[in-house]
Image: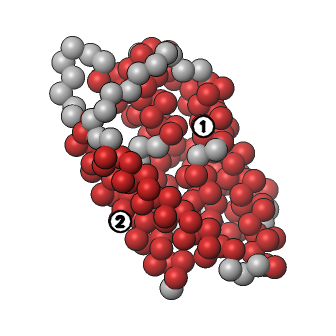
Amino acid sequence: MIDLLTFVPAVAAILAMPGPTNTLLATSGAQAGFRRSLRLVPAELAGYGIAIAAWGLFLEPASAALPWLKPLLKLACAVYLVAVAWSLWRDAGSAENGEHLGARRVFSATLLNPKALLFAIAIFPEAAFRSLGGFLQTMGFFAAIIVPIAFGWIGFGSTLSGPSARIQPRLVQRGAALVLLTFSASLGATALG
């Protein structure tokens, strides 16, 4: 059974953090507008679903034979989050540019997004990878969280392109960097503890 009191906030916090997929969603919102960018949300869902399933199905049998694998991957994720936090802090406020983004690019970025590994090893309950029903239930809750957050990133991007843009991307990125560092410390502690 899934513990929604821990699952929902953890998933929401990770999904809300800037990363490759969210950057593409916000960029599309800024370039193509909110409505035209909504078609990217199913690509994000598909990318995460496939990546999380692959990691979860691989890790469950592999960790039985290699008990050090999950803690090692948790440490690797913690180090990755520190690197992302540093990058966000350092590059805070830099402008994104480029042309309108397609669903294929969002799908690919999400499929390769290290957040999927983090979800599979630290957030999704192990029971989600033991049965199709458990996985579908967990993915249903995941989808219910991801859709409004994706809309938020698209909306965020679309507000940055308007004439009355008051949100300072630099402060958002720096705040996200601090949250990522906190999560990294927590993840590292569970891996070592």
Report x, y in % for residue 19.
Answer: 46, 43
Circle 1 residue: 109
Q: Earlier in the sequence, mark 1 or mark 2?
A: 1
Nearer the observer, 49 or 93: 93
What type is the residue that disc 2 sits on?
Thr
Quadrant in the picture for residue 133? bottom right
- Identify the secondary structure beneath mark 1: helix
Residue placed farthest to the bottom in the image? 193
The relative height of residue 104 versus residue 121 in the rendered view (above or below) is above
| Quarter of the view holding residue 49 | top right
Q: How is the image coloured?
A: secondary structure
Residue 50 image position (x, y, % from top left):
72, 45
Is there a contact, CB below 8 Å, between mark 1 and mark 2?
no
Horizontal arrangement in the rendering, residue 79 relative to residue 87 (left or right): right
Q: Is residue 47 visible?
A: yes
* Observer-nearest of 2 and 92: 92
Q: Position of residue 43 (x, y in %)?
A: 63, 31
Q: Secondary structure at mark 2?
A: helix
Name the residue at 76% across, 69% down: 60
Q: Is residue 80 left or right of residue 93?
A: right
Q: Is residue 96 above or below residue 85?
A: above
Q: Amino acid at mark 1?
A: Ala
* Residue 174 in the image, given as x and y percentages of width and height: 27, 48
Residue with the most extreme front position: 90
Question: In the rendered image of this protein, does residue 104 appear above or below residue 47?
Answer: above
Label 2 environment density (alpha carbons within 10 Å; few <14, some 14–19, many ≥20): some
Where residue 182 is drawn, which disc sits there? 2
Q: From this viewpoint, is residue 1 visible? A: no
| Residue 94 horizontal side relative to residue 9, left or right | left
Residue drawn at x 18%, y 27% is: 166
- In which quadrant is the N terminus drawn? bottom right
Q: Name the residue: 42% across, 16% down.
A: 31
